[in-house]
Amino acid sequence: MEDVIVLYPSPGRGHLISMVELGKLILRLYPSFSVTIIVLSTQNTNSAANAQYAASSTAQYMAAVNLPPISEVPSTPSPLESLFLFPRLNNPNLHQTLQTISQTSNLKAFIIDFFCDAAFEVAANLSIPTYYFFTSSASGLSIFLYRSTLHKTIDKSFKDLNNILLDIPGLPPTLASDMPQTALDRNSKVYEYSLNTGINMAKSNGLIVNTFDQLERKAIGAISDGLCVPDGPTPPIFCIGPLISGSNQDGDDDQHECLNWLNSQPSQSVVFLCFGSMGLFSAKQLREMAVGLENSGLRFLWVVRNPPPEKNKEPNLDELLPDGFLERTKERGFVETQWAPQVEILSHGSVGGFVTHCGWNSVLEAVCGGVPMVGWPLYAEQRMTRLVLVKELKVALTVNGSEDGLVSAAELEKRVRELMDSEAGKEVRERVSCMRDDAVAAVKEGGSSRVALAKLAEVWMATTSIL
Ligand code: UDP
């Protein structure tokens, strides 16, 4: 019987990409294992596209099992809640799938995304060794693990404690309002789900994280020293990153037009603006951004999406952006409305700065490209990530929004100029350039991330299936 590693990603693009890369890496370095990926289907509008991405990017490497769509959803959950809920509703199907796999192979490890926490219970019942693959930072993982302690010691919702600074092992002092979205409201379902996830993580066989030792020394140290789970043992942590997607994620081999455009720009001259797979702005905010970019006089490559609610519609740039903006900036600006080849863009020599929503994949891609950042967090744990990037790692500057969250044209102009042409910008550029070298070293033979994966593979090889 073959030795199988089973992956269970969350269907969000940022989560899926790094889990797929983890599977590919295991197969490349440890070909005695085969990898099976279990693909969840949700009611999310991006779900079909993501399932297709999973199918096309995994077909040549690993077996895929598609769980059937759920027809009966009990209430109308928020998008965030549904990320926890869909795996929960799929537990019976998952149980069946894991049983089938176990009957025909040695199931050595079941690796789950944190949103798929409900699967922990299923795997525990089947006595399958379970690992969490944390697709965000070790700093974010510290918070998950420490949540239970915070829950016991603070009896208010973090959203109501705006100016209170929290002391979390491995993190700089963190404003309660900068905590991940899932942790903000004590009375919400996602609060409960994510609190339980932290508790289960501490009971798992191991924590695999898409980061590397040199990048997040403090947070990794705090976790492995057991500071985040003060009342019990902490499972081993394996930092195996950075795992980033190797090439154009839509499998399109043609050179993207924006890459051709970048080829004709001077070295490190272009500011790239992109806000992940879900980052959206109001029409008012887009206009402010356009004015800020125009007034900065800088070259830019800007990914623009339609404002909600028609977020999946192609944006009409002439209507959305200020009159004449495209014409006036055509010599130095490129506006992209499709899925941008971000990894290639961030490793292109003409890109000198990145305005990012601080999604963890985007951060790792910027680090690997040696591109300094301006952090403009929008959702999830991105406020906390920005704090770590700015205060701890010192690879990013920050934009400040007004009370209602709007970032003015003047503020954006000031920050992108600061990034591209100031002492502070120079400092973050130098820091990120060192981090890029550290990232390269981490994934070389003998580097910290390769050693961590080797340890993990050794554990898997020694594991005997119980079923
Ligand atoms: N991405 C891309 N092109 C786009 C938007 C996003 O290639 O136009 C990729 C980006 O390179 C990253 C992922 O989508 O790998 C987004 O993940 P991240 O963790 O940064 O943010 P999320 O979308 O999960 O908020």
Image (cartoon, rainbow, N blue to C red):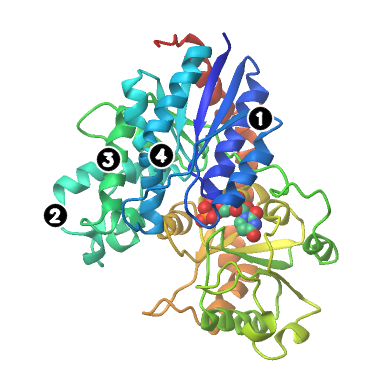
- Direction from residue 118 to residue 286 in the image, left or right: right
- Direction from residue 160 to residue 3 in the image, left or right: right
Looking at the rendered structure, which numbered label has been put on residue 433?
Answer: none
What's the residue type where badge 4 is placed? Cys
What's the residue type where badge 3 is placed? Asn
On screen, residue 146 above or below 184: above
Using the image as rendered, state which of residue 310 and residue 427 is in the foreground: 310
Query: How much space separates mark 3 and mark 2, taking CA atoms?
Result: 17 Å
Q: Is mark 2 within 8 Å of ligand 1?
A: no
Query: How much space separates mark 4 and mark 1, taking CA atoms?
Result: 31 Å
Q: Ligand 1, what quadrant?
A: bottom right
**Contact (CB < 8 A) between labels 1 and 2?**
no
**Label 3 vs label 4, nearer the camera:** 4
On screen, residue 101 above or below 434: above
The residue carrying pointer 2 sits among few (fewer than 14), some (14 to 19) or many (20 or more) residues within 10 Å by Cα, namely: few
Q: Which residue is mark 3?
A: 196
What residue occupies the far front of the structure in this picture? 71
Q: Is mark 3 within 8 Å of ligand 1?
A: no
The residue carrying pointer 4 sits among few (fewer than 14), some (14 to 19) or many (20 or more) residues within 10 Å by Cα, namely: many
Looking at the rendered structure, which numbered label has been put on residue 155?
Answer: 2
Q: Secondary structure at mark 4?
A: helix
Using the image as rendered, state which of residue 246 and residue 376 is in the foreground: 246
Q: Which residue is mark 4?
A: 116
Query: How much space separates mark 4 and mark 2, taking CA atoms?
Result: 27 Å
- Across and down, in percent, residue 263 comes to 84, 61
- Across and down, in percent, residue 193 comes to 29, 45
Q: Count the marks.
A: 4
**Label 4 vs label 2, nearer the camera:** 4
**Label 1 vs label 3, nearer the camera:** 3
- Across and down, in percent, residue 213 comes to 50, 36
- Direction from residue 232 to residue 278 in the image, left or right: right
The residue carrying pointer 3 sits among few (fewer than 14), some (14 to 19) or many (20 or more) residues within 10 Å by Cα, namely: some
